[in-house]
Image (cartoon, helix red, strand yellow):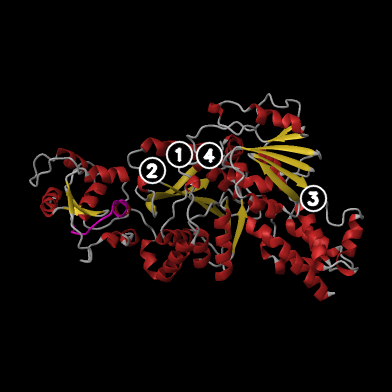
Amino acid sequence: MDQGRYQGAGHGTDHGTDRSPDRREDHGRDHRTDLGGREALRELLSGVDARRFRLALTLLCDGRWWTLADLVRATATSRRGVEALLREVATERSGERFRPVPEEARACRELLGDEPVTAPVLPADPVGHLLPHHTESVELMERLIAGAPRGLHVLDHVAATPETVVRRALLLGARFWLPGARLLCVGDHDLTSLAVALLHPDVEVTVVDIDERILAYIGEQAARLGLDVRTRWADLRLGLPPSVHDHADLAITDPPYTPEGIGLFVARACEGLRDVEQGRILLAYGASERTPMLALKVQNALHDLNLAYEAMYPDFNQYFGAEAIGSAADLYVLRPTTKTRPAVAARTERFATAIYTQGPQAVESRAVEPGRAEPLAAGPSAGTVDAPAEFAPGVLVGEWPKDVLPRVPRARLSTWLAKPYAAAPERVAIAVPAGLEGALPRLLLAARAHHVRAFLGGSPGDLAALSELLSPVYEVTAHGHVLDAVRRPRPGEGRSEDRSEDQGAGEGRDVDDATDVILRRILDNAHGKLANTWREALTRLPGGPTKKQARSIVAAVAPWSADVTPLELPAHRLRELRSAVSSSLRSVAGTA
């Protein structure tokens, strides 16, 4: 039994402090207080799926004031379902709160009969009995969730309750042997990573997410609390970060609730498991009781990945919001099979960029043809389409119309981020669809060209922040939806590379100059492991450290740098990189 679901239900209770006049409503119906003429209400209270409506009506009749959101969350019933019930009940209102008028409450109690649903029931909660022993963890998670960045509707963010994330952590510990295990959180707006690290400190937790704010917040709070949580930036439509491929024992995800979103996030979770035979994926997914066909489409997407359903806990996850699905979602435990990896490999390239329910990358949004700033329905923009030809790029990156520079080599966005391009073109043109602007810093760092021009389907966003982030490598300008990044000369260019480094710390150049040289070397090798490039640069300094010493220095000043490439670093780590390199140089000077 999950008591946490009902803790917020009393928020609408009348404690006698609100003396504003009540307003009675009959929702346009001729309600009667006897039991006749209530066919629609009787129908809702009949049948095997009537428990949710009987519970809602029982709660309504207990004399408390309710809000629609509270009643939805308390019963795990969709907003439309609760509204259908309320249309059949005469209520009085005080602001957004409501309750049945006294005579209606008496009639409804009589209609419920001798077996009203008097207790909140969660049919299959294997860890609800453990929750009372973790009140401090729930309180801490409540504070952390309250302080987290607000959700973005374009990413389908809805916050889970603190009880939910703690119960997820408890379920992992109850079902699996966790000492020494690795957990991959495929998206983590809910902060499940912090709950797991808090309750199971022996677990190594890694988060991949597209939201820079969430990654920064998780990193900050993990450091403050002394938790082992690593963060990686990823737009899963473009691939999983290399450092988490074949990495984890378990994965957990609460993705966009579309078949496309579920299929993509679960496929990436599969790619992150290192042992297919023993690994598991925990998936949060919910649908309204009114839309079983949507649930079937999602389950078909899971079936296409050849995943076995090991367990499914109804209404395990509860949310602040998501009223369309009853503010609740089921928790699936999925087990990969020997046929899962081939299915994932065959399908990941076919997943569309439109995976969300809202925003420019919503499943139902209009398509935007790369290289054009306007939706296809609005017709082509001749100036924008001609621009790539005038720019004369050596390679076209992204999805371009077939009639644009048909003889120029092309590369997918995902391929561009996954590995260095074999040739070294002077100019590169990149088509960035609306909704993928977050990948722009990485797409530019992945290029080795002198001049990169990005044609954006949406706004470039905060140009000043982008320019500052890329300033060690590029000078960035923008004109409308076209952005130009011109590579800056390397620090000390004009001398040999060895000479510029050798003079970096001991022959007149200060730490700042040496920092610029090493930082540029790291960012120019964006596909390589950051710590390796950094360590090598330190060992090449005159009188520099040994490889072992350099490895220890880098690990001490930047523990987050292990096994990561610059392309998967969150933006806040990229901004910290210069300071960390400078600190490493001071450490070298201290050991010399």
Cα–Cα span, label 3 and label 1: 48 Å
Q: Residue at x 66, y 59 (%)?
A: 573
**What residue sits 12% from the left and 43% below the top?**
31
Does residue 49 lie above or below 65 as drawn?
Answer: above
Q: Mark 3 touching mark 4, by CB under 8 A?
A: no
Q: Amino acid at mark 4?
A: Gln
Distance Cα–Cα, label 1 vs label 2: 10 Å
Give how far across and how far down residue 168 sits, in percent.
Answer: 45, 58
Q: Amino acid at mark 3?
A: Arg
Q: Is residue 71 magenta?
A: yes
Q: Nearer the viewer, mark 1 or mark 2?
A: 2
Q: Are the two marked residues, 2 and 4, in contact with CB atoms closer than 8 angstroms?
A: no
- Find disc 4 in the rendering and name its residue: 361
Q: Which residues are magenta?
A: 62-72
Q: Which sits earlier in the primary sequence, circle 3 or circle 4?
A: 4
Q: How many marks?
A: 4
In this rendering, would 136 be left or right of 240?
left
Disc 4 element:
loop
Quadrant location of residue 324? top left
Front disc: 2 or 4: 4
**Cβ–Cβ under 8 Å for marks 1 and 2:** yes
- The residue beneath circle 1 is 298
Q: Percent position (x, y) of residue 479?
A: 66, 40
Residue where numbered disc 3 is placed:
488
Name the residue that disc number 2 marks: 287
Q: Position of residue 308 (x, y in %)?
A: 48, 43
Please tell me whether mark 3 or mark 4 is closer to you in this view: 3
Q: Residue furthest top?
A: 403
Q: Earlier in the sequence, mark 2 or mark 4?
A: 2
Given residues 39 and 488, the one toward you in this image is 488
Q: CA distance from mark 4 to mark 1?
A: 18 Å
**Disc 2 from disc 3: Cα separation:** 51 Å
